[in-house]
Amino acid sequence: MPNKFVLDSIFLNTSKGVKMAGKILVVDDEKSMCDFMEIMLSKEGYEVETTVSGSEAIQRTSSSKYDLIIADLMMPEMSGLDLLKKIKKGRPNQDMIVMTAFASVDTAIEAMREGALDYITKPFKVDEIKLVIEKSVSRQKLTEENSRLKQQLKKDFSFSNFIGQSEGIINLKKLAAKVSVTDSTVLIRGESGTGKDLIAKAIHAASERASGPFVTINCAALPETLLESELFGYKKGAFTGAIKDKDGLCKMAHGGTFFLDEVGNTTPAIQVKLLRVLEDKIITPVGDTKPIEVDVRLIAATNADLEEDVKAGRFRSDLFYRLNVIPLYIPALRERPDDLPLLVNHFIKKYCERNKVDPKTLSPGALEVLNKYNWPGNVRELENCIERAVLFSRGDEIVVDDFPTKLVEGTPQTIVSNETPETPTLESIEKAYIYYIMNQTKGKKAKAAKLLGIDNSTLYRKLERYKIQEEEK
């Protein structure tokens, strides 16, 4: 084996640049092999430590963290297999590669059974060992990154991040936390803009499926034909433009959670297929006859009165009862006025930090305006309002003039007066309010949908349902 100076000269001209950084410990009773590995791996961008003693290697691993350990199997003081077993006792997740002569491959295979990541036979080719090491370190980095992202997911979408201390919100978070540890289907009810998607993400992040995918679709945003192919996928040639097979979102959610937002906007044909997913865990792609098994937890959300839709024949009763296993209700913002100051402060801080502006406060007059407003778009509308105010306000205080005119002018606190002879239904209230907004926007549907906090397609369906299109101006 050449000396260290010669090795350094060889690799100085053959190095192809720095690769993924990582810390590696090389353990071999031959000093020349340690020198060879140190020079080779250092030129590849790794931080390398070496030792000829298995005992010293154990001491080092007790105080230092290594992305990878490379150890010779045949060492006099302590075999690589014994070293592997002792290190794994203290660090079960430690990645380790063993080096062995061809004659002792059986021992290397035994090391794999004990938890070694891979083995390298001597003599080896430099390019081959580089590739094995790079894959091993990349795997470790990817594992660490996944772990970090999972922790971040739990932090970003924990129930504590659902702002509110009112009784309704406290009860909601308690029930949602209990539900998350089960695999039961959940139906989240609430008006548009109340945060149904945030609760769904928090349930997923706190569940046993947190390491799996969280896939979501808004059923109101797509027509029936497109929605079906998005949900269940399709086979090549199933329709014009289907030039290759495509997996549906249900399949993509395998092992995780599938969130169906605005499930009340699905057609009876789609509802039948969703029922099959819930009952049999089976989907059939468009244009195919072979069913596919899927392991998904279904969380659905709606702002519609599904009970009324069931009575009217617009929604299947069997699907409703399957979805409504554990119902969660998110109160509208106007139903929890005590939470408004908490939400306002949260959004002011969020958008000041995001836009890198000095912290701002809210004037008493501005807070009074917010308290008087009815918030038809709920928390989503409030967040948009605060973001705008943070950007438009000139000083360190947000004042009334920083709000849009329609908010300052306010909206009626109730659509039906106390003198109304009959108790109004949710449907009649919704119809009245949509009619009011359509008048305010002079029939401009896109603007009305934005004020209502709903999608354009959802507004179109409601206008048709309540037969008020002809009343636009």
Image (cartoon, rainbow, N blue to C red):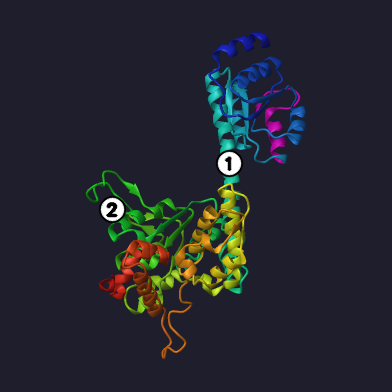
- The residue carrying mark 2 is 288
Left or right: 30 as drawn, with respect to 330: right
Give the farthest residue toward the bottom.
421
Nearer to me, 274 or 13: 13
Q: Amino acid at mark 2?
A: Asp
Residue 143 position, x and y percent, is: 58, 41
Q: First in sequence: mark 1 or mark 2?
A: 1
Q: Is residue 340 visible?
A: no
Secondary element at image label 2: loop
Q: Specify the quadrant that holds the N terminus.
A: top right
Report if the CB atoms under discs 1 and 2 are less than 8 Å apart. no
Residue 32: image quadrant is top right
**Residue drawn at (61%, 66%) of the image:** 341
Q: Secondary structure at mark 1?
A: helix
Question: Over which residues does the magenta segment extend?
Answer: 69-89
The quarter of the image holding the C terminus is bottom left
Residue 54 falls left or right of residue 362: right
Judged by depth in the image, the label closer to the viewer, 1 or 2, is 1
Spot occupied by residue 237 in the image (x, y as percentages of width and height): 24, 47
Residue 347, image x, y percentages: 57, 58
Q: Amino acid at mark 1?
A: Glu
Residue drawn at the location 59% of the way across and 13% of the way down: 12
Q: According to the image, label 1 marks what residue?
A: 145
Q: Residue at x 29, y 61 (%)?
A: 224
Front residue of 361 and 340: 361
User: Are there few (<14), some (14-19), or many (20+) residues within 10 Å of tag 1?
Assistant: few
